[in-house]
Amino acid sequence: MTAEAGLPDTLRDLPVWTPDAVELADLELLLAGVYRPLTGFLGAFDTAMVTAGGRLADGTPWPVPVTLTVPEELIAHRRLVLQDPEGVPLAVLAITESWQDPTTRAWRLAGPVEALRAPAHGPFHRLRRRPDEVARAEGPVLAVATREPLHRKQLGQLRQVAERLGAHVLVLPLLGGEHDEALVRALLGVRKELPEGAEIVPVPLPPRADASRDVLLRAHVAAAYGATCLLAEQEAEGSPIPVVVPEPWGYDADVEVWRPVARIDPDHVQAELTPAQLNDLLDRGAPVPDWFTPPAVAAELAVARPPKLSRGVTVFFTGLSGSGKSTVARGLADALVERGGRTVTLLDGDVVRRLLSAGLTFSKADRDLNIRRIGYVAAEVTRHGGVAICAPIAPYAATRAEVRRMVQAAGDFVLVHVATPLEECERRDRKGLYAKARAGQIPEFTGISDPYEAPDDADLVLDTSLMGPDEAVRRVLDLLVTGGWVRPE
């Protein structure tokens, strides 16, 4: 694939590639100068050194690998146009190295990037600024780089530390999670409770797996935006700016205020809600108490995590051809419609094949693409509060995991494995597919000439050779009722 019209003539014949979400965020920060001294994606030696010891090959401290993964067919080129998911060219990569990751065997490209245009999409884009667009305050600047809203405890700690340091406050909402818009709205909603003059600048920075390295990366980003110290829950050795860990705070139930634990009678200390307790309140649609968080934050939490009875959910059936998954899926859809209260969309494998995926073959690549299309539609149904019921074969664990991630970015995901034995599926053979596969007329047929990877993460396992359709539907309904997505009859 080559670059489209609208580019300079010298770039139109270059290959193009759309990086994944983390790589696009890294690209934006590279182009904005946030990742200095980095000017592009790292090569094999730098990546190995950063992974092992948190330093580039020249000894410069840097906490996380910043790499670009591409298909093998792109490694022979000297330059590559990087575009966003909508096909808008963002930058040109001057390739200085192609290398294969020794662990994942994925191919990666390294080299400096040159901007073609700034990203200009997404909610709150007007708030996203480059470091050189943020006015530098005189004196200390205390940064808070957060992926979570600031509740009353964190607001109190922030005000205390800022006052002690005499610091200007810079709040950096870190984008790249499931509820970016709600996070920014929640922080804007408590702006009046922040120290006077505090600024809010969203930054695209998806989370890293290593918590300590993640804190170091936050510190590098904060330093690029002019912060002289970072407020965080843990210290970070090797940070480019001092990391300030606030003293413990608690809720004084006697006088009903948040303050340092050292100033509270031990008998009156009330801890903040745990994530599990908060999620339970939201799942049930119960109000989040005012002592814990301001009303503006509570409202955004309820938007980001609606009650389960109104939250979107995908019920994803997987199993061999003839296992009975379509029959159970249709029965479940009918039962939910009869109960009322939920919008139901049925994405049966055969129907999707005729409409959404018409023209696709049964090669592994096309079967994966078919499942991704189902997952995309299911995620959109889920995003808007509906119940999506999917019933493809979906034989590959990696593709099912990809669909789970897509859906869980929008709502909830329930996996049902219809584990009817192959012998029973083949005995039924309503469409004559197994006979054709045994005769060699259908290549790559799941269960015969191509594997079925049975899930080990299913929420429910059914064997329709041991139960009728009504019993199978009842078991799925029981799961949905117990989970809180459907009201009991």
Image: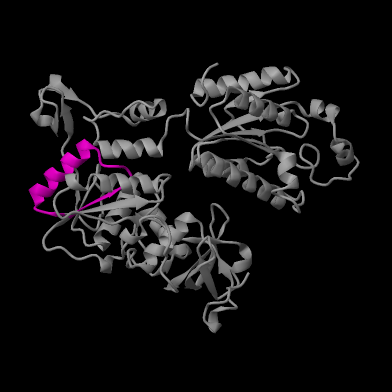
Position of residue 297 measured from the top left corner of the image (x, y, whole percent): 29, 39
Q: In this view, does 232 lie above or below 127?
A: above
Q: Quadrant of residue 182?
A: top left
- Left or right: 314, with 137 as reference point: right
Q: Is residue 162 magenta?
A: yes
The C terminus sits in image quarter: top right
| Scheme of image coloration | one colour
* Quadrant of the frame with the N terminus: bottom right
The reply, left or right, for residue 221 in relation to residue 314 is left
Res 212 visible: no
Residue shown at 40%/25% (left/top)? 284
Counting from the top left corner in percent of width and height, residue 139 is at 11, 61
How far across and how far down the image is residue 296, in percent?
27, 40
Q: Which residue is drawn at 75% across and 40% down?
A: 350
**Disc count in the image?**
0
Specify the quadrant of the image occupied by residue 337: top right
Which residue is the extreme one toward the right? Answer: 439
Determine the residue positioned at 15% across, 63% down. Answer: 137
Q: Is residue 4 visible?
A: yes
- Of residue 254 and residue 217, the one placed in the foreground of this image is 254
Pick the residue in front: 311 or 420: 311
Span shown in magenta:
142-168
Residue at x 35% of width, y 67% of height: 32
The answer to whether residue 144 is above or below residue 304 is: below
Residue 273 location in percent, x, y? 28, 28
